[in-house]
Image (cartoon, rainbow, N blue to C red):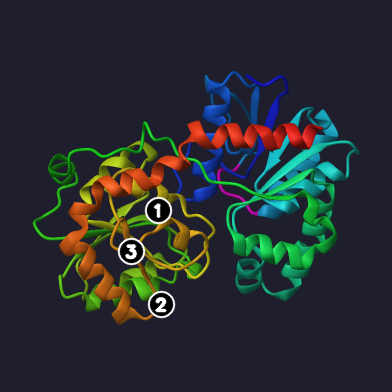
Amino acid sequence: MTSFPVTLVAGINPALTRPGGIRSYVLGLAKYLATAGTDVTLIGIGPDHPNPGYRFVPIVAKSSTSSVAFQRGLRRYLRRMGPPGGIIHLQRPDDLAPFASVGDGLTGVITIHGDPLPGIRSRHGALTALAYLRLEKRGIAAAKRVLFLDVSGRESFSRRHPKETDKFANTSAGIDLDVFRRTDSTEARIKWKLADGPHLLFAGRFETEKNLSLLVEAVRRSKTVPTLLLAGGGRQTERLSNSLRDVPHRFLGVVAHEEMPGLYSAANATLLTSSREAMPMTCLESLACGTPLVATSTGRLPDLITPGLNGFLATSEPLEFARCIDEVVRNGAAMALDCRKSALRFGWDRVLPVLLREYEEALS
């Protein structure tokens, strides 16, 4: 139990199932902090709803909103209520800027889930990227601790903020190992109505940075002729559907959090083709369920995946990625135990005590 309250800040709606690693991280953290006896508040978006574990404060009525609208909501909330005490834990540096403008002495902790700048620049253009950078600078300057899920993200922020690096530290994502665990694969395949033959899972947002063209082309070239299961949604859904016309596949829509362990268990492997990631939650969840990975070498995945033991790392060349798919289809069943073992260090029972020490360091 901590002697200080924790306010988590993220543009998410706890009641609405959506793909996204930040959402999984924040909700898992809120649950485990509350379980440890911490006074937890989550400032988010969407309609209010009762939650027995922690307080939820929606500052924007819509369940889907932009970062600009979320920060505008933060400013309104802070003018009305004032800044919270204790730890304020954010998932984006620009979200701390509204807090910095209402008072000094705040204890802000930021978790960086990969460098957001390349994505902002590619989706919204140079002017929006410049506006973000101004807010990022204010947020990093105001933070007491900045925690990074991957080395690449830390290096990028160190180059942009060389005078702030003394407050930088590495951290780990956390997962609920009681929820994400292996279930009987035969029963899982029956539940998901999977036919005979190999099935590969992609779970996440259908967006440009996920490199979906590599996903499609690699599955198309696989000699084991797998069926691709797609759990999620996003702006690239229609384009993805058109490109899959000659590839066996099933769109599953957005799958509820509690249904994902069974889906991981039903699949032969989980695929990740992203060009940019920090530590993808879907990869940790898959491994915890005993399901191997085939992934691009991005973020901390080279530290997570031991080729031939819990999956394979591949380049962005479709034929090589396809060869790794075929290898995991043939030999993946023997990797289940090692997959589970490789995820144990990311359980909240191990991650949370380290994070609490970072909170205490920030308060001191």
Name the residue nearer the viewer: 274 or 230.
274
* Percent position of residue 171, x then y: 60, 47
Q: Image check: 247 left or right of 103?
A: left
Inspect the image, locate mark 3, and give the three-letter code of the amino acid beneath it.
Pro
Q: Is residue 123 above or below residue 19?
A: below
* Percent position of residue 295, x then y: 38, 65
Q: Is residue 193 above or below residue 296?
A: above
Q: Report the residue at 61% width, 64% height from top.
A: 152
Q: Which residue is mark 2?
A: 316
On residue 256, which mark appears? none
Name the residue nearer the viewer: 351 or 76.
351
Q: Is residue 40 magenta?
A: no
* Percent position of residue 346, x then y: 47, 42
Q: Report the residue at 72% width, 75% height from top.
A: 126
Q: Which residues are magenta?
A: 62-66
Q: Which residue is mark 3?
A: 307
Q: Report the residue at 31% width, 49% height from top.
A: 339
> Closer to the camera: disc 2 or disc 3?
3
Q: Is residue 63 magenta?
A: yes
Q: Which residue is mark 1?
A: 283
